Amino acid sequence: MRQDSDFFISKKYRPDVLIFLVLIPLISAFNYYLTYSNIQWNGFLLLTFSIDTAQGYLAWLIVRRLIFLLDRVLPFEPKPGKRILIQVILTTIAGISFIILTTELVSWIAKGRPAIPEFYTMDVFIISIWFLVINGIYIALHYQHTLSEIQAENSVSLEVFPGFQVKSGNQELLIPAIEVAALKIDDEYVLLFTVKGKKYFLDESLDYWEKNLPAFEFFRLNRQTIIHRQILLGFRKLDHGKLEAELIPNSPFDLELGISRAKAPSFRAWFMPKP
């Protein structure tokens, strides 16, 4: 279940990896420009720049992991202000602490003495500002993803979904959405269950169907399962904020029904929409 949670969270923040693979070396270069007035282009500069950039990548990975953890234990909703404040404080403290510890370690190994005082009076201040920028990027990616989901749901709801085109022997069939119970991943294929217990294989991926199905009728519970509202009886609470969907009595479907903590608020809002 934690893998499912991390999958949905990392999907929400894309393309963060590409952004920071490019941004962190630029940040390191800009820090050098702000800190040093007379930069000497030599092997020592290349070495220190490489160390600083590696520090930056590791600090970013720590921040990224903390944000993923907060998404599981303290989602943005219903109190985004509290979440943002805690995220900024926690990630900045963790990132700065890592930079200080590794800088002191490198200084003792290379020079046999602690880091120069200017590191604490200038560098730490500049780096703390960059952690605010990193948080701003992640917060913006979160709300961009939220807006995209709302727009996708609205656009899908305005369209008439024709149904699922499937093959049964030599027949080409069109299965209306109202006759569908669920979709699930079965090995390398997507399997469609009808409410009457029939099964059909679909060519498209579950990601494709998640984007193209009517949002009011269907919901993706996890990496394996998309479910139709009509076979849902309700849900029950599990540990650590997770949920498990419950089907109507005597349902013959073999489905993965777990819902991660990160996805639980979206499921609640979908299952019990506010008027």
Image (cartoon, rainbow, N blue to C red):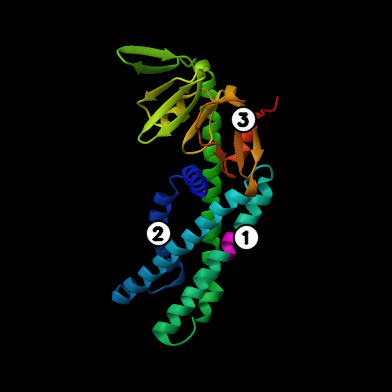
**Upstream in sequence: badge 3 or badge 1:** 1
Q: Which residue bears the numbered disc 2?
A: 26
Q: Amino acid at mark 1?
A: Ile
What element does badge 1 sit on? Answer: helix
**Upstream in sequence: badge 3 or badge 2:** 2
Check contact, mark 2 vs mark 1: CB within 8 A: no
Residue 44 in magenta stretch:
no
The residue closer to the viewer here, 143 or 77, is 77
CA distance separating discs 2 and 1: 24 Å
Residue 92 in magenta stretch:
yes
User: Relative to residue 248, is residue 34 drawn left or right?
Assistant: left
Extent of the magenta region: 89-93
Q: Amino acid at mark 3?
A: Trp
CA distance separating discs 3 and 2: 42 Å
**Upstream in sequence: badge 2 or badge 1:** 2
Check contact, mark 3 vs mark 1: CB within 8 A: no
Q: Amino acid at mark 2?
A: Leu
Tell me the tag on residue 270.
3
Residue 223: x, y in percent? 47, 39
Q: Which residue bears the numbered disc 1?
A: 89
What element does badge 2 sit on? Answer: helix
Of marks 2 and 1, the one in the foreground: 1
Q: Quadrant of residue 174?
A: top left
The residue closer to the viewer here, 1 or 20, is 1
Of marks 3 and 2, the one in the foreground: 3
Residue 78: x, y in percent? 68, 42
Of marks 3 and 1, the one in the foreground: 3
User: Relative to residue 241, is residue 147 drawn left or right?
Assistant: left
